[in-house]
Each structure stands twice: as structure tokens, then as C-alpha cells.
Image (tube, rainbow, N blue to C red):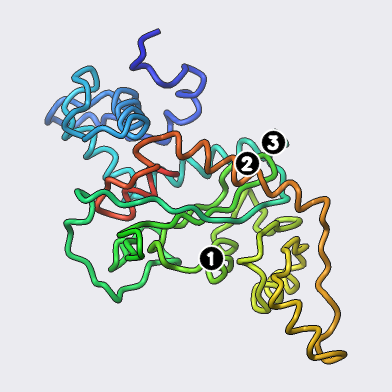
């Protein structure tokens, strides 16, 4: 098999029906969908510039245009939803989910785009470009933060990209709002580190009857103890379940093996997020 053939026939059969097909109208020759998708995969796997894409995938402008359209019209999200639903029907989805985030440094070629510095990232309509393009300035430079919910096997369920300096805790609610696997929108339990330990998050999980497996920071413990009986009881914490939170760390480790994702080269946030999806 050629090193440029990145999908097996079985994998292609799962997604082929969700991709554009010839309409029968006169015009330019219709590009081979499989060739386009494999070109997109190859680019993000290697991290090369679009114009350096091997000629075996056709014109690089055509491959980029396919990715741009599939990102903006929601095709990538539809494919991800279909694959997730397929896994759920075969009992391959563990609804003990984990939440965390990871940061990718933005390349200088991605940041030469006008943006609203005080703009906010879009959490509700993931197909609309946010004013800040999910770029945030920190001591290390411009970066983008990827927030995800993954199931107990490390399968990504929800992906949201924000500016690099955005906090983790406020993103829990938007992640849960976008969670849908088949007919299910509520996991059995949620595993998170100390960054997600807040009164608002615990109240949200309690109201939705989701078991919170979130460690309590030392400062919150001290604040509760100083208040005495008014501080209330310590939150329940299942240390055995918490050991499985490393699945999301392993998931990010696999994602960072894709050089086009470990470093952000895309100017638009919806393009970069679609690549992760």
C-alpha cells in the first residue's frame, strides 16, 4: 500500500456517504473525495505547508478548499457525530467522561490576521468564527487552548477551541451543552482535575445528576474548614474512579503526534478546530 493511502477501505466506507458527491451538472471535473480527505490527513499528520502537499493529492488549493468548506458547513462535525453514534450502538462508548485542556503554540504564519483583541471565543455556535480567532497572548506568546470531553476509552466526544489564556473551569458548562451521543446528553460521571472544582460546576453536575469526580484544591479545603460547621461537608470524591482520568492525557498525547495540531498553523479557529475533530 502506498504511504499516501492513509485510510483503509473499511474506514472510508464509514464516512464516504457524508462527503460531497458529483451533482451531474456541467462544470469543472469533480475531485476525488478520498484523494482530498487523504490529502488533508497527510497535511496535518506531517505539519507541512499546504503548498508543499505532494502532487499525488492534486492541487493543494483544491485540497485546502475542501477542508475549508467541510469545516464551515459542519461536515466534519457530522462525520464525527456519525462515528460516535456508530461506536455507541456497538457498546464502545464509556459514559464515564473526563475533561481537560491542552495548549498549542501558534506559528507566526497563523497570527498575521486582523483580530479583535478583546473579542471572546464562541461557545454556542462552533461553526462561526470568533472575533479573536481563538488566539490568546501569554508569556509564551500567542496560543490556542483546546478543551475536550473524552469517554472512558479516550474517545473525543466534544471539542472547543478558545484563546490560550482562557480558564478551564468556565468551559465545563459549554462542553456539557454540546455533548450528544445518540440520544444521550448526560454522562454517568465526570472526572476532572482541581481546575474544575468550583461551586458553579459542582452545582451544575448535581442538578443534572452527574457524579462529580473532581479533586478539591487545598485552598478550598482550608476555606471550608475555617468556616467551621458553616463550611459544610467535604464534597464526595471517588479516588478509585479518579485514577482513570489519565485517559484524556493519553488522548492529548496521541493528538500531539500530529504535527499540524501540536503547533497551530491555521489562521482561522474553525479550520484548526475542524482538523482536531
Q: Is residue 176 positioned above or below 201 on the image?
A: above
**Mark 1 falls on what kind of element?**
loop
Relative height, residue 18 to residue 55 (above, below): below
Res 169 quadrant in image? bottom right
Dot 2 corresponds to which residue? 154
Q: Earlier in the sequence, mark 2 or mark 1?
A: 2
State how far apart marks 2 and 1 are (Cα).
19 Å
Q: Which residue is mark 3?
A: 92
**Label 1 CA crowd tier, 10 Å (few <14, some 14–19, many 20+):** some
Residue displayed at 43% across by 21% down: 7
- Residue at horizontal 69 percent and vertical 49 percent from the top: 245
Label 1 vs label 3, nearer the camera: 1
Residue shown at 65% from the left, 53% from the top: 98
* Disc 1 from disc 3: Cα separation: 27 Å
Residue 201 picture location, percent across and down? 65, 72
Q: Which residue is mark 1?
A: 168
Amino acid at each position: 500500500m502506498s504511504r499516501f493511502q492513509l485510510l483503509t477501505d473499511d474506514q472510508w466506507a464509514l464516512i464516504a456517504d457524508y462527503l460531497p458527491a458529483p451533482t451531474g451538472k456541467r462544470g469543472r471535473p469533480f475531485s476525488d473525495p478520498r484523494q482530498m480527505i487523504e490529502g488533508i490527513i497527510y497535511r496535518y499528520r506531517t505539519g507541512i505547508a499546504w503548498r508543499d502537499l505532494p502532487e499525488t493529492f492534486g492541487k493543494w488549493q483544491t485540497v485546502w478548499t475542501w477542508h475549508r468548506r467541510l469545516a464551515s458547513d459542519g461536515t466534519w462535525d457530522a462525520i464525527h457525530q456519525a462515528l460516535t453514534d456508530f461506536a455507541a450502538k456497538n457498546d464502545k462508548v464509556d459514559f464515564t467522561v473526563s475533561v481537560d485542556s491542552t495548549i498549542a503554540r501558534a506559528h507566526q504564519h497563523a497570527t498575521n490576521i486582523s483580530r479583535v483583541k478583546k473579542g471572546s471565543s464562541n461557545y454556542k455556535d462552533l461553526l462561526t468564527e470568533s472575533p479573536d480567532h481563538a488566539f490568546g497572548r501569554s508569556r509564551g506568546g500567542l496560543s490556542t487552548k483546546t478543551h475536550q470531553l473524552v469517554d472512558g476509552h479516550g474517545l473525543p466526544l466534544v471539542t472547543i477551541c478558545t484563546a490560550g489564556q482562557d480558564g478551564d473551569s468556565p468551559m465545563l458548562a459549554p462542553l456539557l451543552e454540546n455533548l450528544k451521543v445518540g440520544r444521550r446528553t448526560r454522562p454517568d460521571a465526570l472526572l476532572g482535575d482541581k481546575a474544575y472544582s468550583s461551586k458553579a460546576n459542582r452545582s451544575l453536575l448535581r442538578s443534572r445528576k452527574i457524579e462529580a469526580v473532581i479533586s478539591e484544591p487545598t485552598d478550598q479545603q482550608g476555606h471550608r474548614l475555617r468556616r467551621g460547621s458553616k463550611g459544610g461537608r467535604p464534597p464526595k470524591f471517588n479516588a478509585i474512579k479518579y485514577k482513570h482520568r489519565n485517559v484524556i492525557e493519553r488522548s492529548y498525547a496521541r493528538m500531539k503526534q500530529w504535527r499540524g495540531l501540536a503547533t497551530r498553523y491555521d489562521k482561522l479557529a474553525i479550520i484548526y478546530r475542524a482538523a482536531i475533530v
